[in-house]
Image (cartoon, rainbow, N blue to C red):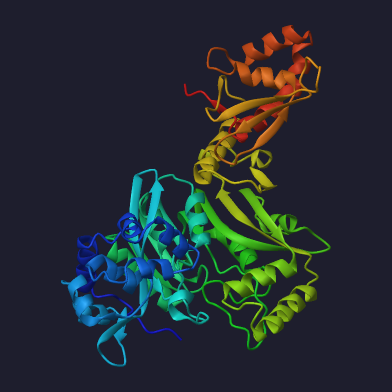
Amino acid sequence: MSDALPPTPDPSLVAALAADLDAADFRSEPLRSLWGEEADDALGRGVREPVLRAIARDVGALATLGRLFVLGMPQPITLVDDALPRLGFEGLIGLGMARFSEDEEDLTPSALIRPQSFVDAEGIGEWWIASDLDELALGTALPPDHVLGVGGASRTLAELIVPVPVGRALDLGTGCGIQALLVSRHAGEVVATDISARALAFAELNARLNGVSNVTFRQGSMFEPVADEAFDLIVSNPPFVITPRVEGLTAYEYRDGGLIGDALVEKFVRDVPAHLTPGGIAQLLGNWESRPAAAGLDRLESWIDPALDAWVIQREELTPLGYAELWIRDGGTTPREDAFGAMLEAWLDDFAEREVTAIGFGYVLLRRTGASTGSANDPGARLRRFETVPQSLSAPGRALRDGLDAHDSLTRGIPHTLVTAADVTEARHYMPGDDDPSVIELRQGGGFGRTVSVDSALAGFVGACDDELSVTQIVSALADLFDVPLVDLWNDLEPRIRRLVLDGFLVPLAP
């Protein structure tokens, strides 16, 4: 069990801490400069010795705070007082973020604070994010009620959030509160929920620490705290990790939702429509199991209300063995430890009981149809995309937004004028001695980084989309060039043009 934090942080103490961190320039770049890029990169891999060597004799405020809050190491009380002149060591204890060591000469941190940079439509910024001590600081496996800082999944979800202004937003399963803070920049009001009182304490501390005032916090499971409410945006990095329900196996609150298999993701997907306003969007990360009767994406599709627009992107699939190893190691247990074998057996037995053949991981976007989506009264016009995208992504949140806009535009027909997106390039492959290409590819530099094979007619169409000619004029010219009936060429090109618009290769020209 972790040390207790006050359920509501003292505003005056939080303000003093923020002022001290600001005065010490406790931010990513100053810290990286302090101990060097190579040491900083090593710290990102869980190796702290280079950082310690670089600041071993440095008793300045930034070095002291780096050892105390970034590394989670005890520091002399006198140095802490010097580094936090407004808050003082007693204020830090009052916030529940430190305690006396046994000799009462050092202060032992109870929490980490790490700068977290971000980039969004409003610009570049940085938060101070407090969370529980990690494995590096503890030197042991994590306790069950551990509150995670900003990890890989948090950063992934942050990149996926569709960047549009909204009135009300919900961060379900807020953890340390990072998503609520990010969403607060383009939402009028944010409600952040979590089943863990400890997580909510950290989340509220982080909101106050960064001067964010439009987030409120509620405790409870799933949608219980917002039972009769609807939101324009719902985001969630839920505890979706599939964990065996076996006595003696640690269930971490931050990753294990307490249900069997992928039932938590199913519950979210089935329950979320009641909490979306017309046109409202829900986005979450999740796992789904493949079984002999149905692939994971097919099972996920069966859970989704057919009245919703749905865009699901599977990033990877793991075997039961690969999945078990990943999450056992994530909890701090390595194959060198005696417990590893028993844990692995428990995971594999759990998957075998449900005949699981693979576990998918990916992103789910759901949208309640409305007048603005163009498909409210036409089920055939609903967006239903279930795809596997293994390649690296660039600004996926903007790509999702543009994809939704493109879908809505296409419900009214192919736009009058299209232009080729600025990040699209063409590659032609020739067999030796041939004059005509054997393969023509369109490649997308941003977004989902897609590559599409096209024929000469479609390549010619895309090449002519430079805002000088309308779609009709381009297709008519191509029909003359290839000496084919216009109607036949249009019937061939039309569905493929739609797909290029939906995928962002072609962009409707604004009126």
Q: x%, y% of residue 293?
A: 83, 62
Question: Residue 485's spot in the image, x, y percent?
Answer: 78, 11
**Whether residue 176 is visible:** no
Q: Quadrant of residue 341?
A: bottom right
The quarter holding residue 36 reads bottom left
Residue 390 screen position, x and y as percent: 66, 49
Q: Nearer the viewer, residue 369 or 477?
A: 477
Residue at the image position 68 percent from the left and 78 percent from the top: 244
Above or below for 436 versus 293? above
Residue reaching furthest to the left: 86
Residue 90, percent from left and from top:
21, 82
**Camera-side residue of 125 and 30:** 30
Q: Which residue of the protein is positioned furthest toward the bottom in this rendering?
A: 102
Across the whole image, how many numbered discs are drawn on residues? Answer: 0
Q: Can the viewer see residue 233 in this picture?
A: yes
Residue at 67% from the left image edge and 68% from the top image edge: 262
Relative to residue 121, is residue 379 drawn left or right? right
Image height of 441 relative to 39, above or below: above
Residue at (51, 79) in percent of width and height? 142
Determine whether, in the image, residue 198 is placed left or right of residue 241.
Answer: left
